Image: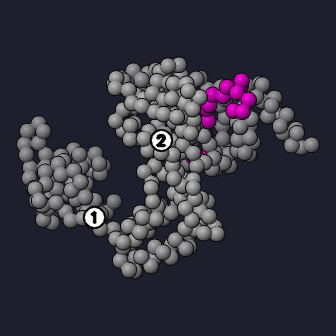
Amino acid sequence: MKKTTRINTEMRYINNRQQFTIPDLMAEFEISRSTAARDVAAIQELGMPLVSTVGPDGGFSVMRNQLLPAVQFNTDELKALFVSFMATTNQQLPFLQNRQTLTEKLLAIASQTQQDSLIALQQLLRFEQTNPRNTQLLELTDTGSPLLRQVITMSLQTRHLQLTLQNGVTDEIYLQYLGHQQASWRLFFYSLTKQQVKNLPLDQVKMIAPIATDLDLTSMETKIKQATPTPTITLKLGPHAIAQFNRYHQLADQLEYLDPFEQSAQYETYLDLNDQLAVANFIDWFLFLGTGVQVIKLPSELNNQIQQRLRAGLN
């Protein structure tokens, strides 16, 4: 990052927090102590009034009523925001109530020249979620489930939750994260009731409520690790298979790259062979990877089913 850009970004960083230390700047911008000290001096020379304090909790703070003016976006930054927003069409965004209102507000902070450029971008670019016949059409799938916002809001306060499913079953859980794939949201969690690592679609949840009891995070990490099944499948992927993997894979799947150029990688996963739907989906995905897949470990029953699928495809 160039010095001028770094200084400007640091000023915004300081303005947003109003209090900071030299180690804060070092960690945030990956700079040395001497560079951080020089940057603080440069920021003061630019007129930002900083007050220093000494002691164990010492650092710098911005004088009251001397904060920077409202943020102004340049043309490229506005384009990046606008294009990112366009790309999320029909993705069930949480907190989204009116996409048109947000778009108009984004256009309102732009100059006339910038507005013309943004509108031209909207007409020029197409995304896989865009309706080609009407690029401004708001699809019904664009608005997320009302429960999505509720889950996120609760989880920012506590990850210890109680789920009530559509079938009436309840479960006490520790929520790990929410994942989005193929226009649907899934909950990834540790079930305290069943002591299992699980995930399920959000649309299977009827109600969700916070549980006041705090959970020990270290203990939860240990339980999650112990409950995670040992991988039953190990594959080595070449360049083509890696490209296919990056095009589509399950949210929890990860690759372990085996070389610095990321031309070979190892993939491990657990598959419940009693779950016929999961087995069928895995075989579809395995064949989707195409060439460049080397089997390191694969259950014989699963291998037989893959061979049967291949033979059926040749007939």
Q: In the rendered view, how is the structure colored?
A: one colour
Q: Residue at x 55, y 62 (%)?
A: 138
Q: Quadrant of residue 112?
A: bottom left
Give the class, few, some or many, for how many residues have Cα within 10 Å of label 2's Cα (few <14, many ≥20). Answer: some
21 relative position to 92: left or right:
left
34 relative position to 184: left or right:
left
Tell me residue 166's x, y (percent). Answer: 57, 32
Which secondary structure lies at badge 2? helix
Q: Residue at x 22, y 59 (%)?
A: 11
Give the class, few, some or many, for how many residues have Cα within 10 Å of label 1's Cα (few <14, many ≥20). Answer: few
Magenta segment: 262-278
Q: Residue at x 58, y 68 (%)?
A: 135
Residue 127 visible in the picture: no
Q: Quadrant of residue 267?
A: top right
Q: Of 290 and 93, which appears nearest the observer?
A: 93
Vertical position of residue 127 compared to residue 207: above or below? below
* Residue that numbered label 2 is attached to: 147
Q: Amino acid at mark 1?
A: Val
Q: CA distance from mark 1 to mark 2?
A: 33 Å
Tell me residue 183's x, y (percent). Answer: 58, 49
Q: Which mark is residue 71?
A: 1
Residue 268 among magenta residues: yes
Vertical position of residue 195 compared to residue 73: above or below? above
On-image quarter of the N terminus: bottom left
Q: Residue at x 29, y 48 (%)?
A: 28
Residue 89 among magenta residues: no
Disc 1 and disc 2 in contact, CB within 8 angstroms: no
